[in-house]
Amino acid sequence: MHNKKIINPLFQVGLDIHDRECLIIGGGNESENKCDRLLDAGAKVQIIAQQLTPKLNRWAADKIITHKTDAFCEADLENIMLVVNTSSENTQFSQNLYKLASKKNILINSFDDPNYSNFGMVALVRKGHLRLSVSTSNTSPSLAARIRQDMDTIFSTEEFLDFSKILAKLRQNIRIRIPNRKKRFALLRSLVQQFQIEGKIHYPNCWQERFSEILNCQQKNCEDKLKSCQSCPLSK
């Protein structure tokens, strides 16, 4: 449906797409990022694009993904569970694709356009077994991406990767040896009871004044007037 609410917290779930057919429209950097995430989840990925990034080209050459250069047609949605459309510059195409996918009850995400999406792809931290999603309810993808960057750094230590890896083995081991569910949960919780994340948020200098200045700015066609607005971040 067009003209969806901008502020939509969505319903966060983990979707099992292992061995399921997923389609990506476009072959740029955004497609590469989404393809990497789909492959990590075990999906069978098809890509429709005239050109691919070097990494996508390697994956296609190695038969890790399927690549098609012909223009998209409705038959391409056959047996597809999920579609990621990165061709955001073509609004009419995004609208038509969204209608087709919705009609067939196929999940679809159109990059940077929630009007033609029925699910969102949040900023994601992937470290070892950890999957930490960051969403700002579509109000500030740049903030979600910035938070993801810092979280990625925090969880990149070798000790954390070992910690989470061994915990996974322990869980499987304990599930076999301790049939009592209550005792099993108590033991697993005790293993992480002292695990703690500490942090502090650092905000940009004078952010309130800068944000207010931009909100109240009446200038249009900024690219032609940057010299007259030296305080604007775009002028730097």
Image: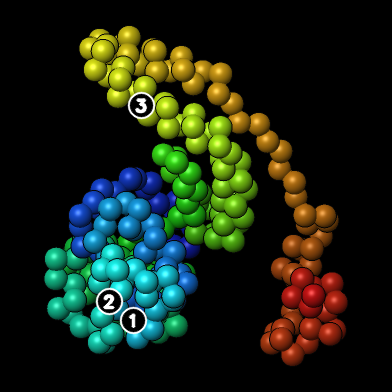
| Among numbered discs 1 and 2, the one appearing first in the sequence | 1
Residue 120 visible to an observer of this rendering: no
Mark 1 vs 3: CB contact within 8 A? no
Residue at x 33%, y 81% (from the top left corner): 49
For residue 169, the mark is 3
User: For residue 130, which quarter of the picture?
Assistant: top left
User: Residue 164 location, x and y as percent?
Assistant: 45, 31
Whole-number angstrom distance, CA of label 1 to CA of label 2: 7 Å
Which image quarter holds the N terminus?
Answer: bottom left
Q: Is residue 43 above or below residue 202?
A: below
Looking at numbered disc 3 in the image, what kind of residue is underneath it?
Lys
Mark 1 vs 2: CB contact within 8 A? yes
Q: Is residue 117 above or below residue 184?
A: below
Mark 3 vs 2: CB contact within 8 A? no
Judge the density around disc 3: few (<14), some (14-19), many (≥20) Cα neighbours within 10 Å.
few
- Front one among 37 and 177: 177
What element does badge 2 sit on?
strand
Residue at x 27%, y 11% (from the top left corner): 178
Residue at x 41%, y 26% (from the top left corner): 167
Which circle, 1 or 2, is nearer the viewer?
2
User: Residue 147 location, x and y as percent?
Assistant: 60, 50
Question: For mark 2, what is the residue?
Answer: 67
Residue at x 47%, y 51% (from the top left corner): 124
Q: Is residue 87 above or below residue 8?
A: below
User: Residue 22 location, x and y as percent?
Assistant: 25, 64
- 192 sits to left or right of 78: right
Whole-number angstrom distance, CA of label 3 to CA of label 2: 37 Å
Which image quarter holds the C terminus?
Answer: bottom right
Question: For mark 1, what is the residue?
Answer: 49
What element does badge 3 sit on?
helix
- 57 sits to left or right of 179: right
- 19 sits to left or right of 91: left
